[in-house]
Image (cartoon, rainbow, N blue to C red):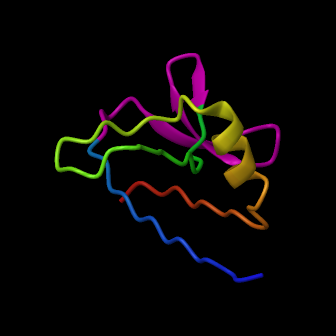
Amino acid sequence: MKKLTVRIHAELEIPDDWEVIEHKSGIQALKIGDRFIDFDIVPLATEENDMDATWTDEDEELTNDILTTVTGLDSKLEIG
């Protein structure tokens, strides 16, 4: 078995009324109005090998197969 490491870094420009909070479940979340947003990894797949390929997570079986291989996931939210 091999180990694959995926590093994703994203920056979002957000409205002033959105805030990062500590959710009661113990994770950091982005609070937008009455909703709490968590950032997670969702694998996207395609059967096309061209520039205009359509990537989706519609293949639930494949998505679940990939997600069951995740052994660790960490996200950090900060407003700067």
Figure quadrant of residue 34: top right
| Rendering coords of residue 72 (x, y %) | 75, 67
Residue 22 visible somewhere in the drawing: no
Is residue 76 depicted above or below 33 in this figure?
Answer: below
Residue 38 place in picture, x, y as percent:
60, 40
- Residue 25 position within the rendered picture, expressed as x and y whole percent measured from the top left: 82, 40
**Left or right placement of residue 45 versus residue 62 in this view:** left
Eyeballing the image, is 77 above or below 37? below
Q: As drawn, is 34 to the left or to the right of 80?
A: right
The percent position of residue 22, horizontal first and vertical second, equals: 69, 45
Point 72% across, 42% down: residue: 64
Q: 63 left or right of 33?
A: right
In this view, the residue farthest toward the bottom is 2
Between 50 and 78, the one nearer to me in the picture: 50
Q: Which residue sits at x=38%, y=29%?
A: 17
**71 or 34: which is nearer to us?**
71
Q: On the rendered structure, is 36 left or right of 22?
A: left
Residue 74 falls within the magenta-colored stretch: no
Q: Is residue 31 magenta?
A: yes
Nearer to the camera, 42 or 79: 42
Please report the bounds of the magenta region as a residue range: 14-36
